[in-house]
Image (spheres, rainbow, N blue to C red):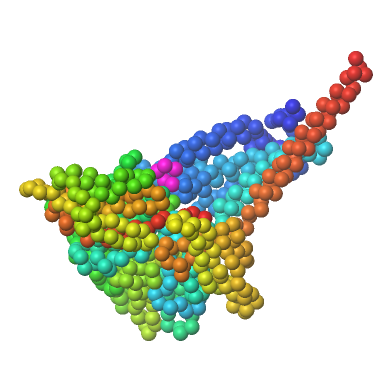
Amino acid sequence: MDWVEFSDTRDDFFPLMKALPALAAGLTALLAATGCQKEEITTYRVPKEALPAAQPAATASNAPAATTAPAAATGTSGSSMANTPVATASGNALAWTAPSHWGAKPAGSMRKGSYAVKGDGGEADMAITAFPGDVGGDLANLNRWRGQIGLPPVDQKEFDRTTVHIDRNGLHMNVVDIVGTGANAQRIIGAMVPHQGATWFFKLSGPDALVAREKTAFLALLDTVKPAAPAR
Amino acid sequence: MNDLARQFRDFFVSLKLTVVLIVLSLILVFVATLDQVNLGIWAVQEKYFRSLFVLWNVKGIPVPVFPGGYLIGGFLLVNLISAHVYRFSLTWRKAGIQMTHAGLILLLLGELFTGLLQEDFSMRLEQGAPKSYSESFRENELVVIDTTDPKTDEVVAIPEPMLKRGASLQHPRLPFRLVVKDYYPNSALQMKSGAPPGAPQATQGIGTTVTAVPQALTYKQDERNIPAAWIEVAGDSGPIGTWLVTTIAGTSNSAPVLRPAQTFQHAGRSYVIAMRFTRSYKPFTLTLLKFSHDKYSGTEIPKNFSSRIRLETPAAKEDREVLVYMNNPLRYDGFTFYQASFEPGNDKVTVLQVVRNPSWLIPYIACTIMTLGLAWQFWIHLAAFIAKRTRQPQAA
């Protein structure tokens, strides 16, 4: 085992040893210098560019914060720009940009995205989920949601009549808007989005007045839903 | 040799030091791996490995709690080189060990150089629009551009870390001062009418209609922070105005209301003020001629995507077309351009990843040297063993 023979007290050291302290000091200085690189103002001259300077949306391989959200479309809809770009959540397959005034909640194991939408004394819940297959079909899903706010099931004809179809970014979305009855009526606005063999559900539920007021923001969010760009 | 020098030498050539450093690096890697859940890979690399010390924030004061990657790696490097030099003897028997150590030293140096010199930027190309710069995935800069000259722009770029609240920035190329009235490392925009009272005020540009609200920093790999700052431009005779700048305004990709560049005049010259992704200009131009995006029929699953690009240098030394597609990057001038991404629904845009790593060959060379060293060492032992075996029957 001669290759681990380390005797720490050999005196007949190699002449290069004399350079050792200098070497150690040099390396330490190099590391210290690199450890705290100083930020500096730089100046340079470049050929003129058309204004505004062309600049990309965030372009990491998974398309980070979307900078293309149609803020102007909603800029007039209320005091807060509903879908001014904030951080983009991205699941495995779809990415979206949530309105800035919606508070993100922990998604938990079932949800791809979860937001608390607060308003006058109430709170609505935005849930984004995805399940394999068609989960029983859009009609069954609508009737499940109807049941949740105390409404009787409807048939295919009624489903076809009330469902709004939206096509965005290569995705087809079936959007429904249902309101319960009574004094504390609940409302659900939901979108069912088939994508790559799964169905994605975007569901905003809560007190009727609050959900109705947030409908613009919800639709603006749908505008931003797109397949997450694959990594290289 | 005096006692101090001897102690110094014994410390640095000691095998105990090697063991301690390896144990420390094990702990560092373990903790950093766990912390990746909170910080993401990029922040973990900066905090744990590309630092001298791991710092904890105790009431706003950074306190070093553990040696960082650079410190451990640095000591390991000094330890290895010292031991190497100290025990050096030029014999065939030792050649394998020497080579293995030399390879390891080279590997450590390679990582140091990669950390220092590697550039990993992105380049978004719109069809027909020539571009000669790439942009950082993480870093941002405040720029003040003198646009007076009809042919060229003079850019003063201030890195984001210099934008501290209350900071006053001056530069010989700027005939005014920039005062950072406020700065949020991550923000979201909202209409000013809904802004909470006491929010910073802009007097010019988009900041008169929208305002930014602070957001928690994100460390996720697929998100980036959107910094916002209120910059007061102050000339000799007082303030010229205060602008709100953010990376999502003043770009061709911004929402329409935020799109116009923010400009102002001072002393007969025109300026643009903006916050943008840190740029790295190249001595050549790339133009997207065509982006192709094939999908498996009936699905949205990408089958193949490629970009036909024109590469030009100013003196027309180079002017050619190249095809960049998956696993077939363009290598030019020390940069490698990979087909990285695209924008769904927009086939007039391609996104390339631009990587420059001058020390990319070092790990290969280091591993080759180590392999040869180990093979040599093994062969020496095997040869000795065989010789012993062949001698044994005669002895018996």
Question: How many numbered marks, from 0 up?
Answer: 0
Determine the main secondary structure of the stretch shown in magenta. helix
In the rendered image, residue A44 lying in the magenta stretch gets the answer no
Left of B241 or right of it: where is B109? right
Q: Quadrant of residue B387?
A: top right
Q: Quadrant of residue B169?
A: bottom left
Front residue of B103 and B335: B335
Left of B369 or right of it: where is B109? left
The residue sitting at 75% across, 40% down in the picture is B373
Left of A66 or right of it: where is A103? left
Front residue of B367 and A8: B367
In the rendered image, residue B39 lying in the magenta stretch gets the answer yes
Image quarter where the N terminus of chain B lies is: top right
**Residue B187 visible in the displayed image:** no
The residue sitting at 40% across, 49% down in the picture is A197
The residue sitting at 37% across, 55% down in the picture is A95
Establish if A193 lies above or below B250: above
The residue sitting at 59% across, 61% down in the picture is B329
Q: Position of residue B81 (x, y in %)?
A: 68, 42
**Residue B244 visible in the displayed image:** yes
Establish if A22 lies above or below B259: above
Image quarter where the C terminus of chain B lies is: top right
Taking the view exactly as shown, the residue that stands out farthest to the left is A183
Q: Position of residue B113 (x, y in %)?
A: 60, 53
Left of B110 or right of it: where is A76? left
Front residue of B317 and B152: B317
Taking the view exactly as shown, the residue that stands out farthest to the right is B394
Range of magenta residues: B36-40
